[in-house]
Amino acid sequence: MRYVVAFVFALLAAPLSALELDAPFQNIDGGSLRISDWAGQPVLVVNTASRCGFTPQYEGLQALYDRYRDAGLVVLAVPSDDFRQELSSDEEVKAFCEMTYGIDMPMTGVTHVKGSKAHPFFASLKKEAGFAPRWNFNKVLIAPDGSVAATYRSRTQPLSGAITKEVEALLAQ
């Protein structure tokens, strides 16, 4: 049943192609994560870093997740060293996030988000939606049907009206 749901979700996903949208991310806790794991739910995907001027946004991301998780929102943190501001291992990133910000949202292992090594999700996002992270803490809101609902640059705070209004609208559908 899960595979049928994932397949249907992937087929509905637009503008991102099904194969690239559902490409697995390495889970920082082991195993893998796929966007289709949360089929029918909005997912905010955020490329993060532990040593960046925007790192305090982890607090807002966790608060956003806490506020809306019971209603169905997922916040997926995607640590990346593409801007040379990430710790050197998944273990260090996980420990830093848990100890400093109390993070319990889903998190991938350190992942490329730009360039020729970009994870297929981010490569597809650039190709098909024209959005690529220019720095850490860019945000992509995926609608419950798998489409890109909105994109936000680094300076947009997680609890900003721009994000919370869109999240609330998606949760009300």
Image (spheres, grey):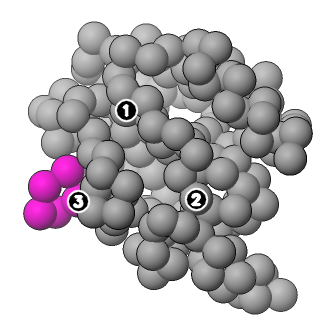
**With respect to residue 165, does 134 lie above or below?**
below
x and y percentages locating residue 85 in the rendered image: 19, 28
Specify the label residue 147 is tagged with: 2
Mark 1 and mark 2 lie on one chain; the one further toward the N terminus is 1
What residue is disc 1 on?
Answer: 138
Q: In the image, what residue occupies the spot 45% across and 17% down?
A: 156
Question: Marks 1/2: CA distance?
Answer: 17 Å
In which quadrant of the rendered view does residue 105 lie?
Answer: top right
Specify the label residue 118 is tagged with: 3
Q: Please state the extent of the stretch shown in magenta in the rendering.
A: 114-118
Q: Nearer the viewer, residue 87 or 136?
A: 136
Q: In the image, what residue occupies the spot 68% across and 22% down?
A: 164
Q: Quadrant of the N terminus?
A: bottom right
Element carrying mark 3: loop
Please state which of the two labelled residues, at mark 1 or mark 2, is closer to the viewer: 2
| Type of the residue with mark 1 | Asn
| Type of the residue with mark 3 | Ala
Please state which of the two labelled residues, at mark 3 or mark 2, is closer to the viewer: 2
**With respect to residue 74, does 162 lie above or below?**
above
Characterize the local packing of mark 1: few (<14), some (14-19) or many (20 or more) Cα atoms within 10 angstroms.
many
Please report contact status of discs 1 and 3: CB closer than 8 Å, yes or no. Answer: no
Q: Nearer the viewer, residue 163 or 62?
A: 163
59 with respect to 47 (left or right): right
Q: Find out whether residue 134 is within the magenta segment.
A: no
110 with respect to 43 (left or right): left
| Type of the residue with mark 2 | Ser
x and y percentages locating residue 13 in the rendered image: 59, 70
